[in-house]
Amino acid sequence: MARKPLVSHIYTADPSAHVFEGRMYIYPSHDLSLEVEENDLGDQYQMADYHILSQETPEGPTTDHGEALHLRQVPWASRQLWAPDAAFNHGRYYLYFPARDKQGIFRIGVASGLRPEGPFTAEPEPIKGSFSIDPCVFRDDDGTFYMYFGGLWGGQLQCWPTGQFIADATTPPADQPALCPKVAPLRDDMIEFARPPADAVITDDKGQPLLAGDNTRRYFEGPWMHKHAGTYYLSYSTGDTHLLVYATSKSPLGPFTYRGQILSPVVGWTTHHSIVEFKGRWFLYYHDSTLSGGVSHRRCVKVQELFYEADGSIRPMGP
Ligand code: FUB
C-alpha cells in the first residue's frame, strides 16, 4: 500500500478512524498553515475547526466532507481544537474534542449530530470533571463506552496532581511512577462521565508501574484503545522519544502490561494514531509531517496495514 497522505489539499493530523455505516470515517485535527514559532507547550498547534474524512476502503480515495465544527460554535472554548475522536450510540454521532477554555485550561467537549461526517452541535459546557487532551472513546462488547485521555507538557496532564489545576506543576522525577492516561466510563447519554476519571496504570512485565524517566516506554499522549481476540490494547505516543507503543490487559480499566513498539519515529515531532478493523483486516492510521517538508505543526494523515503475530503481539512497523 502506498504510504501517501490521505489528502493533500489541507493539513491533517491525529487521525481517529472508525467504521460507520460500512465506510471508514477518519476524525483528524485540521492543521493550519501558520508561520508560528514552535515551543514545548504546543502553541504552534492553533487549530480552529474539524473536517471529517471518509473512505470506501482504506486503500481507496478519501473524501473531505468539509467543515463539521468550528471553534466559534463551541461556547466554552477559546482556542486550540486538538485531537478529536467520535462514537455512535442511540442513533447519534458524537464528536469528542479537547480545547482550551476561556481560562486557558484544556477541557474535553462533546458535539453531536445525525451523520458521521457532521455537522455537529456542541454542548454549551465541556464534560464535567474533564481536563487535559486527546480523548479516545471505546465501545466495549457489552455496550459500555470508556473515554481514555491525557497528554503531558502542553496537554497539561501534569497540572492536576491534587485534583486542582496548578499551572506550573511539573512531571514527576525520573525515579517516580510516570503519569498515567486517564480512563472513565461514559454515562448512557454520552455527554458526561459516569464515574470520575481514574489512572489507567501501565506496568512492566513484573507488574511495576513504568517510571517517569523511562521515556521510551512511559505514556505521553494520544491514547487509543482497541480489542483483539479478547485482549484490550492500549496504544499511545511516548512524546519526546517519538514512538508509538502499546500495553495490554484483560480489563478495559487495566492495569496494562507494556508489550512493545508499533511504529518507529515519523518525520515531525508528534506521532499519533488509531487502530481499526475493516472487513477482517487491521489498519494503522497515523500522521507525519512529510507533506510540509517536516514542519511539525503541518501534518498529513496516512494509513498502513497492521499485523498481529500468533502470540497476539503487534508486528512493529516503520513509517
Ligand atoms: O495536534 C495537537 C497535539 O499534537 C495532539 O493533541 C497530540 O496528540 C499531538 O499529536
Image: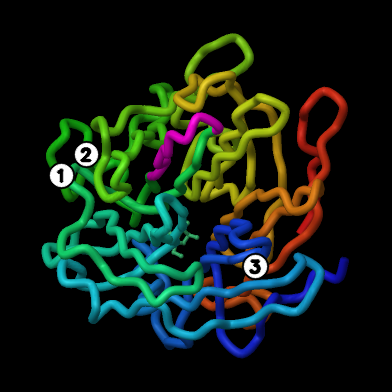
* Amino acid tagged 1: Ile
Q: Does the magenta stretch include residue 315?
A: no
* Amino acid tagged 2: Trp
For marks 3 and 2, the one nearer the N-term is 2
Residue 135 appears left or right of 191: right
Q: Mark 2 points at which residue?
A: 160
* Amino acid tagged 3: Asp
Q: In this view, does 235 lie above or below 42?
A: above
For marks 2 and 1, the one nearer the N-term is 2
What range is drawn magenta here? 141-149
User: Quick one: SS at disc 2?
Assistant: loop
User: Alpha-carbon neighbours of circle 3 within 10 Å: few (<14), some, or many (≥20)?
Assistant: many
Residue 209 picture location, percent across and down: 48, 19
Alpha carbon separation for disc pair 1 and 3: 32 Å
Q: Which disc number belongs to residue 100? A: none
Q: Name the residue under label 3.
A: 288
Residue 222 appears left or right of 46: right
